[in-house]
Amino acid sequence: MRLGLDGRHALVTGGSKGIGYAVAAELLAEGASVAICARTPDEVAAAVKSLSEVDGGGPVSGHVCDVTDADAVSALVASAAAEHGGLDILVNNAGGAHPGGFEDLTDEIWKRDLDVKLFSQIRCTRAALPHLRRSTAPRVVNVNAVYARYPDPAFFATSVNRAACHNLTKVLAQQYGPEGILVNSVNIGFVVTPQWANIRARRAPDLTESEFFAQLAAEEVPLGRFGTVDEVSGLVAFLASDRASYITGASIDVAGGMGKYS
Ligand SMILES: NC(=O)c1ccc[n+]([C@@H]2O[C@H](COP(=O)([O-])OP(=O)(O)OC[C@H]3O[C@@H](n4cnc5c(N)ncnc54)[C@H](OP(=O)(O)O)[C@@H]3O)[C@@H](O)[C@H]2O)c1
């Protein structure tokens, strides 16, 4: 399927690795120009270098930015839009997990988690709005988690804070639908990325990565395995494209069937 993203300009937060990197590569391969951001300068530079080699890809730029810093987010969006000549697609992907039960979570951890998950999406979307309003096909895709609708005490903060992100997507879609700005949520279950090294180290230091993945998948995932980043990136690119022009406020799981809800 041709998604027709030629000439579109995208910003992918957390694009240096994991899901964000795969999304950036997919958007580039579909003809978009892409700006990525993350906090670690070396990783941003390495990602830009390899993204520049994507076959048929448009221009790519890297920005060192912490999405919990409001001023840095404003500067990021302004410079990405100036460098690429506009902004049509915002992928709010930056984030990470703070696994832990209720009694392990201090106020500080709660606030940090809310900041990186919810407020990053709020800030980036707010900063992107003037540019999206000038786009002929404006899109926001929020990368969220199945835990938003399938809470798990082992991922307590994620379960609570992603529920807020989920409703943020819904109300943004309602508010900006009349202006033609489409906002959707892609909810991840378990996808193999660098963040899982951390989670395994905290939760199951005695298991190998594949043992840990197999155990979690057997408990939770009907398809019986973790997903891969390119099983997410295709959906994000589709939602960013003209083929998804009547989809907004949707919440789509990429989770191998995980989540016991209808
Ligand atoms: N993988 C899963 O199974 C899974 C499940 C549910 C939800 N998710 C969500 O999917 C998104 C991508 O996750 P992933 O698994 O690909 O994670 P990852 O491999 O750890 O990559 C996260 C990316 O976000 C960046 N990042 C983190 N905090 C940031 C901040 N404050 N400011 C700017 N960039 C930041 C990281 O770079 P720096 O650290 O250098 O900043 C990196 O580029 C996250 O929002 C995550 O919560 C993933």
Image: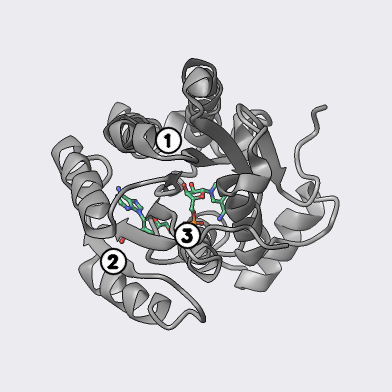
Using the image, determine if residue 71 lies above or below residue 16.
Answer: above
Looking at the rendering, the quadrant in which ligand 1 lies is bottom left
Q: Name which quarter of the figure residue 207 lies in.
A: bottom right
- C-alpha separation, residue under disc 1 versus residue under disc 2: 38 Å
Q: N-terminal of the two: label 1 or label 2?
A: 2
Judging depth in this view, the residue of 208 and 259 nearest the camera is 259
The x and y percentages for residue 200 are: 54, 61
Whether tag 1 and tag 2 are in contact, CB under 8 A, the answer is no
Alpha-carbon neighbours of circle 1 within 10 Å: few (<14), some, or many (≥20)? few
Q: Which residue is mark 1?
A: 104
- The amino acid type found where label 3 is placed reads Gln
Mark 3 neighbour density, 10 Å: few (under 14) some (14–19) many (20 or more): some
Please state which of residues 81 and 100 is positioned toward the viewer in this rendering.
81
Horizontal relation, residue 113 to residue 224: left or right:
left
Mark found first going from the N terminus, 3 or 1: 1
> Spatial distance from mark 3 to mark 1, Cα to Cα?
19 Å
Residue 223 visible within the image: yes
Tell me the SS state at disc 2: strand
Q: What residue is at 35 percent from the left and 36 percent from the top?
A: 134
For residue 65, side relative to residue 168 (left or right): left
Asked whether, in this view, residue 125 is left or right of residue 77, the answer is: right
Secondary element at tag 1: helix
Instruction: Name the residue tied to disc 3.
Output: 195
Q: Quadrant of the C terminus?
A: top right
In the picture shown, does residue 108 fall above or below 196?
Answer: above
Q: Position of residue 229 (x, y in %)?
A: 60, 64
The residue singled out by tag 2 in the image is 61
Callout 2 amino acid: Ser
Q: Is mark 3 within 8 Å of ligand 1?
A: yes
Across and down, in percent, residue 96 comes to 43, 49
Nearer to me, 112 or 165? 165
